[in-house]
Amino acid sequence: MKVFVTGASGNVGKAVTKELLSHGHQVLGLARSDSSANELKSLGAEVQRGTLADLGILKKAASECDAVAHLAFVHDLDDYAGCCAADRAAIETMGSALAAAGGNRAFVISSGTMLLAKGQIGTEDQTYDEGDPFGALRGPSESVALAFAEKGVRVSVMRLPSVFGEGGLGCLALMLAVVQSKGVVGYLDAGENRWPATHTLDVARAYRLALESGKAGSVFHPVADEGVCTREIAEVLGKKLNVPVASMSQREVLEMFGPMAIAMGADSPSSSIKTREELGWIPVQPSLLEDLRCGNCLESQTALPSWSHWPQDRAV
């Protein structure tokens, strides 16, 4: 199977690319820069230069492949609504190309468990929370994608938890931003809110399984740790970094993170029972706390992602 992968040089995208190639598939990876293109070539993938804004390129690439794994997303908090609109346009373009090509081609798009209602265990059968700012803006991408199930496309949605390992930090980046700014590991209030989490390599395997055998119209949760309390994460991280651990007020979190304050305080435990049953997916990599104690995910990360901090001179 030849798979067009957007976001192929990102943390999760690169792992998906490696996973597909190691199981005999071909990969055509979307690359914005020379460095990304060279990295993909070194892995053994073919390269398609372009961005998510190049709809003509996306259409052509999708039509020439057997499947599409859509992992790219522009993280611009100044225009998050515009980023989500661009995501929907890319999904519509690639989905239409797959539908026109025929043959029950696979299409896996990326979403997030954080888009579900907070304070309860989210399941694959639930829809995104329209009352949540992020859910209201990004959630419709799921609807656009799933509509292609009625057009002969074997489409599915992969809702990602906090993904760590192999150079990625997921929501840990928020805590590390507090370390850089204040010299402490911070968590919101009592730290009882829970983050679901999964190692990058386990997530990559879920994408491959969905591309190979996922049923049309499915929603998957590649979740290993259903929900880890942020206070517990902070305590392990503080011990590992040898820095104090402290609670932060909602005002402090909002001032530091702006729109991403929602993520810092999100209570989003998520179930993966249905995903495990339908895909035969079983996570085998270390849990978030195990990986933190070993220090693997910290040692492989060199810089925090731009979305993990909010410039202090900007109005909230």
Image: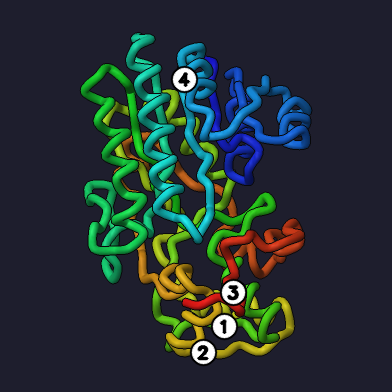
Q: Residue, x 26% and y 67% (percent of image)?
A: 120
Mark 4 element type: helix
Query: Which amino acid type corresponds to the residue marked 1 in the rendered image?
Result: Gly
How many residues crowd around disc 4 within 10 Å: few (fewer than 14), some, or many (20 or more)?
A: some
Which amino acid, mark 3? Met
Displayed quadrant of residue 51: top right
Q: Is there CB contact under 8 Å for labels 3 and 1?
A: yes
The residue that label 3 is drawn on is: 175
Front position in the image: 256 or 216: 256
Q: Front-most of 210 and 73?
A: 73
Residue at the (43%, 40%) spot, across then down: 87
Which residue matches tag 4?
59
Question: For the residue carrying disc 1, how many other residues have a C-alpha within 10 Å: few (<14), some (14-19), or many (20+)?
Answer: many
Is label 2 in contact with label 1 (beta carbons under 8 Å)? Answer: yes
- Up/down of 40 relative to 236, above or below: above
Between discs 3 and 4, the one toward the N terminus: 4
Instruction: Specify which label sits upstream in the sequence, 2 or 1.
Output: 1
Measured from the top left, where is residue 52 in percent x and y?
52, 34
Instruction: Name the front one of labels 1 and 4.
Output: 4
Determine the CA span between mark 2 and mark 1.
Answer: 6 Å
Q: Which numbered tag is attached to residue 247? A: 2
For numbered disc 3, what is the local secondary structure?
Answer: helix
Q: Calculate the distance from the C-alpha at mark 1 to the C-alpha at mark 4.
A: 44 Å
- The residue sitting at 60% across, 65% down in the picture is 290
Q: Which residue is mark 1?
A: 186
State how far apart marks 4 and 2 are (Cα). Answer: 48 Å
Q: Quadrant of residue 193?
A: bottom left
